[in-house]
Each structure stands twice: as structure tokens, then as C-alpha cells.
Image (tube, helix red, strand yellow):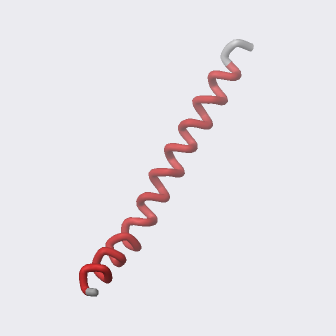
Amino acid sequence: MRVKTISFAVFCESAPFVRTVLCRTVAKTLSMGFVVRRWPQ
């Protein structure tokens, strides 16, 4: 039970960081797609 509690606590601690990384990755992907779409025009 202790290991589960510790791993859950670690996951909760790292969740905001993971969310930030995912948001940045998605934002980069979207901005790249926007640039690529706009480039030929």
C-alpha cells in the first residue's frame, strides 16, 4: 500500500508538469501547422 501511495503522490506532483509539456507540444504542433498552411499563400 505504501508503494501505491508514494507512486500516486509522485504522479499527482508530476501531473501539472506533464500537462504543461503536452500543452506546449500541442501549441508548437498547431503553430507549425498554421505556418505550413500559410506559407504557400
Horizontally, residue 23 falls left or right of residue 30, namely: left
- Residue lying furthest right: 41
- Residue lying furthest front: 1
Image location of residue 12, percent across then percent down = 40, 73
Q: Residue at x 63, y 25 (%)?
A: 35
Q: From the image, which quarter does the C terminus lie in?
A: top right
Image location of residue 17, percent across then percent down = 41, 60
State which quadrant residue 34 falls in. Answer: top right
Horizontally, residue 26 falls left or right of residue 8, namely: right
Image location of residue 23, percent across then percent down = 53, 51
Q: Nearer the viewer, residue 10 or 35?
A: 10
Image location of residue 37, percent across then percent down = 69, 22
Q: Residue at x 49, y 58 (%)?
A: 19
Q: From the image, which quarter does the N terminus lie in?
A: bottom left
Q: Residue at x 57, y 43 (%)?
A: 27
Horizontally, residue 14 falls left or right of residue 6, namely: right
- Residue lying furthest left: 3
Compared to residue 1, the image places residue 28 above or below, namely: above
- Residue lying furthest top: 40
Q: Residue at x 58, y 30 (%)?
A: 32
Report how many numbered discs are placed on residues in the image.
0
